[in-house]
Image: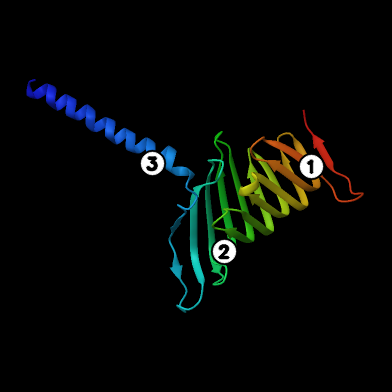
Amino acid sequence: MNIRKRKIIFFQFFLFVISTLIVYFFYFNKDKVENIEVENIQTAEDESSNVFNDIEYSGFDLNGNRYYLFSSEAIFDSEKPEIVNMKNVLARFTFKDGSILIVRSKTGLFNNKSLDMFFTENVNSEYNKHKLYSNNIDYLNTKSLLKVYGNVNGSGPKGKINAENLNFDLKNKTLDISAIENSQVNVNLVN
């Protein structure tokens, strides 16, 4: 073989190896939930405290959806280090179909082992031009469930809703709307 053919074969082999590695790291390695990226951690002045400022988590949930979680202040419990208490929380979920859910809250909890997230106090969310306000939103990664509850009200291009509970099955993409006791669910749809 001449030198030109050898270079072409070597270059093709090199591209094959690189593409194989890229496929492995982006598609097969994402199921490892333990690979949570923690960025921009700044410790508090007291080294013995478990308070951190401007903490970020990102990765993939158990269903392969990408998540990004930010908190201006995070407090870790020494006895339960997997539980992170957060203040001024922002979360962004990018689902496999390309849709995006953004959740903001004053406080929240994050379990960095199960990837379950609990948003509390002044919770507002946005999803496909719909805005939703509630007391709580639970992103239960282990159950593929998004629970919205406590004074739920929202609006969007299709109308308005007032309810006590919304349960969104993330796998099946179904929505269950309910109220407590004799309360009514109020939904106004626009054609």
Q: Which residue is mark 1?
A: 177
How far apart are the alpha carbons under marks 1 and 2?
A: 30 Å
What x and y, as percent, mark residue 24? 38, 38
Left or right side of 49 for 107? right
Q: Is residue 120 left or right of residue 14?
A: right
Is the residue 55 above or below the residue 3 in the image? below
Outermost left residue: 2
Left or right: 130, with 40 as reference point: right
Q: Residue at x 71, y 51 (%)?
A: 133
Q: Is residue 34 placed above or below 157 in the rendered structure?
A: below
Query: Percent from the top left, x then y, of residue 167?
Result: 73, 44
The secondary structure type at the circle numbered 3 is: helix
Look at mark 2 in the image and give the residue it sits on: 84
Please report the residue visible at 68 percent of the width from the left and 52 percent of the height from the top. Answer: 137
Distance from disc 3 to disc 2, alpha carbons, whole Å, reads: 28 Å
In front: mark 1 or mark 2?
A: 2
Closest to the camera, between mark 3 and mark 2, is 3
Relative to 59, is 75 above or below?
below
Give SS at disc 1.
strand
Residue corresponding to mark 3: 25
**Residue 104 versus residue 64 in the image, above or below:** below
Quick one: label 1 or label 3, which is nearer the N terminus?
A: 3
In the image, is 40 to the left or to the right of 5? right
Residue lying farthest to the right in this orientation: 182
Q: Mark 1–mark 2 contact, CB under 8 Å?
A: no
